[in-house]
Amino acid sequence: MKDVESIEQFESRKVEHIRVAMDPAVQSLGAGFDSVSFVHEALPEIDFEDVSISNQIFTDSKFAKDFRSPFFVSSMTAGHDDSGRLNERLAACADSEGWAMGVGSQRRELFDSGAALEWKRIRTKFPNVTFFGNIGLSQLIHTEVSVVRRLVDNLEATALIVHLNPLQEVLQVEGTPRFRGGLLAIETLVRELGCPVVVKETGCGISGPTAHRLFSAGVSAVDVAGRGGTHWGRIEGVRATSNPKDAVRAKAAESLGDWGLSTVDSLRQVLQVLESSRPNATAQPSANAISRPEVWASGGVRTGLDGAKALALGASQIGVAQPLMAAALKSEEDLRQVMQRFDFELKAVLFCQGVRSLSELRSRGQWTFLERGGGL
């Protein structure tokens, strides 16, 4: 499959996505974090300096990675004139704060050999940052694994994220809503790529049954990326309103403006699947095996408290996007302060739970679901 967009059209669309994503009107409601409440521990019996938010992913495998924080920069932007500046800021702060970084879609590298230079330059400047590559499922279906492997190698990525965005693709004027054969493509990628494969949604969540299919295909992690943050259906709706020929898409985006599973609802469903079923042991060769697949959470994570709630529920990693982009558009220092705030708020939660680590938060944390709250 060849892209029908010109490079100029591709760049224009990516720049427009960033601009529209900063509009409060494209932020959906109801991530579900308001439905979770921690029980305060007034006598924690620890010092604040005892608290550590260090984290490990892909545990007990050759791909295991340690981080100073469970937060990571969720995939956002790449492939246009301004993306180099923004991604360098994101990488610089990920490096200084000990976060991993998911990169924006590497789709442009499939048709523009020069597009990889942006990542090569950033990788050279920040050799210690853990990067996650990124490709859309509708592109993966029509791309040989050997080509996808080049995307991983260009970035020296620890893992590859495959993003699912059917609503965005069907509402986007330039969209490619072709997902037939997607599960087979993921199974083939897992078997042949040689590094962990993470599958994520882009703001509409992943259901339990879909997660079961993904775990059975051998993926190393599922990032639920639920409703409650930036809604790409709304973004494409805003873009469509500028052209009278796209009136149908604009109205459809309005009707579907709250489409999707909330982040908390999706997270609970996927975690339940992981607990109740064992993935297909033959789906990936032992050389690439992850002893236990993980569930990551993103979508409407706006504070360290939100992240703490997702971790207490059982998430392994927490993705943050829009708050980081809003800060990165201002300055590197603004971005660094936002990341430090997320980490500090998470540590404060652990301290006020009387626990020293994320594993203790998951096993001993005290929280409850409220009768009223978003998304449940």
Image (cartoon, helix red, strand yellow):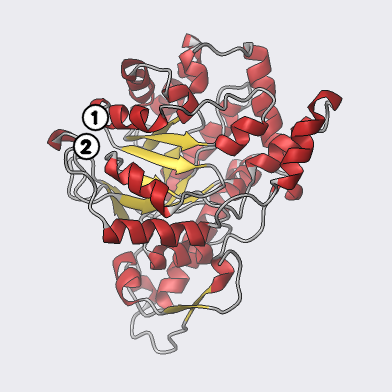
| 137 or 193, nearer to the observer | 137
Rendering quarter of residue 242: top right
Residue 110 location in percent, x, y?
A: 46, 15
| Residue drawn at point x = 50 percent, y = 62 percent | 264
SS label for mark 2: loop
> Relative to 54, does residue 202 appear above or below in the rendering?
above
Q: Is residue 320 visible?
A: yes
> Relative to 126, does residue 226 appear above or below in the rendering?
below
| Residue type highlighted by circle 2 | Ala
Q: Are marks 2 and 1 in contact (CB under 8 Å)?
A: yes
Looking at the image, tell me whether mark 2 or mark 1 is earlier in sequence order.
1
| 62 or 259, nearer to the observer | 259
Task: Say which residue label 1 marks.
Answer: 191
| Residue type highlighted by circle 1 | Arg
Residue at the left extreme of this rendering:
286
Task: Say which residue label 2 marks.
Answer: 283
Residue 282 location in percent, x, y?
A: 17, 38
Badge 2, how many Cα within 10 Å: few under 14, some, many 20+?
A: some
SS label for mark 1: helix
* Cα distance in 3D space between marks 2 and 1: 7 Å
Residue 61 lies left or right of residue 18; in this view the side is left
